[in-house]
Image (spheres, rainbow, N blue to C red):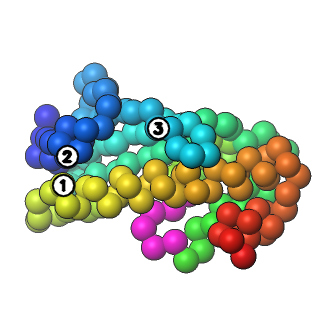
Amino acid sequence: MGRIYNAVLKFLREDNWRFSEIEGMPAIRLGMSGRNGNWLCYGHAREEQQQFVFYSVCAVKVPEEKRQAMAEFLTRANYGMVIGNFEMDFSDGEIRCKTSIDVEGERLTSALIKPLIYANVAMMDRYLPGINAVIYGGVSPKEAVAQVEGR
């Protein structure tokens, strides 16, 4: 489909990831199982923009009455995060972890893709207990981040 998409496919195959291609799009999807839960991941090659973006999508949507608290939790989690960030859609409560790279004028390689994907799934797995604590446990956003980050 394109240079960026082909580089992503090459990496995923070489690194033995189980994934499926999304028909008609330069995109892939895969299921992820971490220590703290399961979720879906999507990778999208934005060929025209010369970018690759990878998402981990939380399996649980935040109920409307918890979205303000979750926004605070995600803002606190994002502070100091170097690679990637969390985001939430206020309209439906979907939480995603996003990592991306712009390779304008350069070539996307497996050495660039690997840390982008690995950091993404590690962040989602690390912060899932805090997400669940805010939604289901009545834990404050500040305390939930402190628990996750070991403070």
Left or right: 33 as drawn, with respect to 108 = right
Identify the residue at horizontal 28%, vertical 27% (top origin). 21
Residue type marked 3 = Met
**Which part of the image, by quadrant, shows the C terminus?**
bottom right
> Mainly helix, strand or loop, the magenta region?
loop
Q: Do we see residue 91 in this rendering? A: no
Please, is residue 134 above or below residue 21 in the view? below
Where is residue 110? Give x, y as percent: 18, 55
Instruction: Verify whether residue 82 appears in magenta.
Output: yes
Name which quarter of the figure residue 16 lies in.
Answer: top left
Identify the residue at horizontal 85%, vertical 57% (top origin). 139
**Which part of the image, by quadrant, shows the N terminus?**
top left
Q: Earlier in the sequence, mark 1 or mark 2?
A: 2
Residue type marked 1 = Ser
Identify the residue at horizontal 26%, vertical 55% (top origin). 113
Neighbourhood count class around disc 1 (C-alpha, 10 Å): few under 14, some 14–19, many 20 upward: some
Q: Which residues are magenta?
A: 81-86
According to the image, label 2 marks what residue?
11
According to the image, label 1 marks what residue?
110
